[in-house]
Image: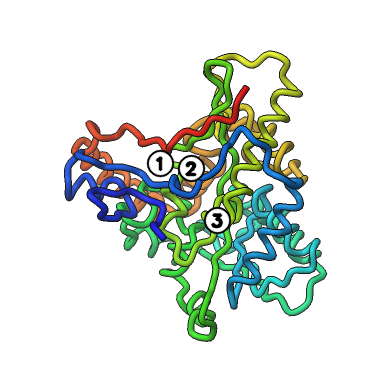
Amino acid sequence: MKRVGWYVNNNFFLNKWEAIEKHGNKNISFYFYEDIFDKYDWTKPIDGSLNDLYWLRAQQLRDSYDYIRLWYTGGSDSQTMLNAFVNNNIFIDEIVTVRVGVKDNFDDLDSEVEITKRAIPNLKALNIKNTKITVVPVGPQKMFKNLDNQDYFKDVGAVFLRSPVYASSIYTLFPNLMLPAHDKYETVANVQGHLKPRLEYKNNQFYCSYWDNEFTGFNPSPNIECFYSSPSFPTLHIKQQQVLQSYLKEKYKRIENNSVFSENTEFKHDIERATRDWVDRSVDLLKGQTSIISNKSKLAIKEAFLYNKRIYDAYQEKLYYFKKIEPRFLQHRKSLKTKEYCLGP
């Protein structure tokens, strides 16, 4: 099966920049399972409740893999998929959460408050037997190593101080934690909470599509299984769009044409109320976030400046390099959109 990503004449690229560098801007396309999604009429309701499909998806993953490694942040996406396993007594081999900080004491960092006060307490409160809980400590030394060595063109597609949260980075920084499962088991899945629903409303119809830059962070992750958006369980991806559509129609009696309902808009919490389980928002750093750089990332940069100049300077050096080479790609910076599917009025 084709991988999600950028293609030029059937040649696959993990990053659009690499495709541009090798082929210019000719015939670059972005593939997101169109051949699978084309088989469905998105205007016809998918059978079953969303919770039923969450349960079936969790069971499908359990039946398909020898070892399931679930990546957990305590946010609504990872909490909902964790609940799908736990509430239905479906075994998870390992739960991984990542701590990232410019100081060794992560609890002192505001950028880590969601992990400190939500994810870690939630994991401690879990009453499940034989599941391995792995808390990955990306402290100052590992952060610097990541900044110093990471290939931003291939790994994450942008200079991002907190990129060690990505599985692709963790496999590089902590092979001792990640690789033993691959040596022991034939099939290993890194289950992550992607993708959130995304809808646009235009010409009095709802449409679903995504921009390619929404995939750059997690797409390089090895053995990835996106819980919500998978070619092996396409009905869940479609169902969550339909549930969001129904929620929006009920809540907003009048919807403006050209409205966009996505994670980085003011409708973020509508998406979560409609399609995700409840999480404690009292420690949420993303309230009302509509900018490209998250509040968490802004705090991390500020903390680097205050507490670890070595990391801050390395980050600025990467930014300088990025800005220096970026003009080569400016004419090609326009994002590519996935195929659009109509859900009806």
Residue 108 location, quadrant: bottom right
Compared with residue 314, is residue 62 higher up or lower down, i.e. above or below?
below
Q: In this figure, which residue is indicated by the disc labeled 3?
A: 226
Q: Is residue 99 left or right of residue 163?
A: right
Q: What amino acid does circle 2 point to?
A: Asp
Q: Residues within 10 Å of mark 2 (few under 14, many from 20)?
A: few
Q: Closer to the camera: disc 2 or disc 3?
A: 2
- Whether residue 148 is visible to the viewer of this picture, yes or no, is yes
Q: What amino acid does circle 3 point to?
A: Cys
Q: In this figure, which residue is indicated by the disc labeled 1?
A: 212
Whole-angstrom CA distance, mark 1 to mark 3, is 15 Å
Locate residue 145, reporting x and y percent.
38, 64
Whole-angstrom CA distance, mark 1 to mark 2, is 19 Å
Q: Of label 2 and label 3, which has the lower sequence position? A: 2
Q: Which mark is residue 302?
A: none
How many numbered marks appear?
3
- Along the line of sight, the residue nearer the viewer: 267 or 324: 267
- Along the line of sight, the residue nearer the viewer: 23 or 35: 35
- Along the line of sight, the residue nearer the viewer: 302 or 324: 324
Q: What residue is shown at x 62% (from left), y 37% (from top)?
A: 241
Q: What residue is shown at x 21% (from left), y 42% (from top)?
A: 325
Q: In this figure, which residue is indicated by the disc labeled 2?
A: 38
Quarter of the picture holding the C terminus: top right
Q: What residue is shown at x 51% (from left), y 47% (from top)?
A: 300
Compared with residue 62, is residue 183 higher up or lower down, i.e. above or below?
below
Q: What residue is shown at x 60% (from left), y 26% (from top)?
A: 344
Locate residue 81, reporting x and y percent.
68, 56
Locate residue 305, reporting x and y percent.
45, 46
Residue 319 location, quadrant: top left
Q: Secondary structure at mark 1?
A: helix
Locate residue 101, reporting x and y percent.
53, 57
Q: What amino acid does circle 1 point to?
A: Asp
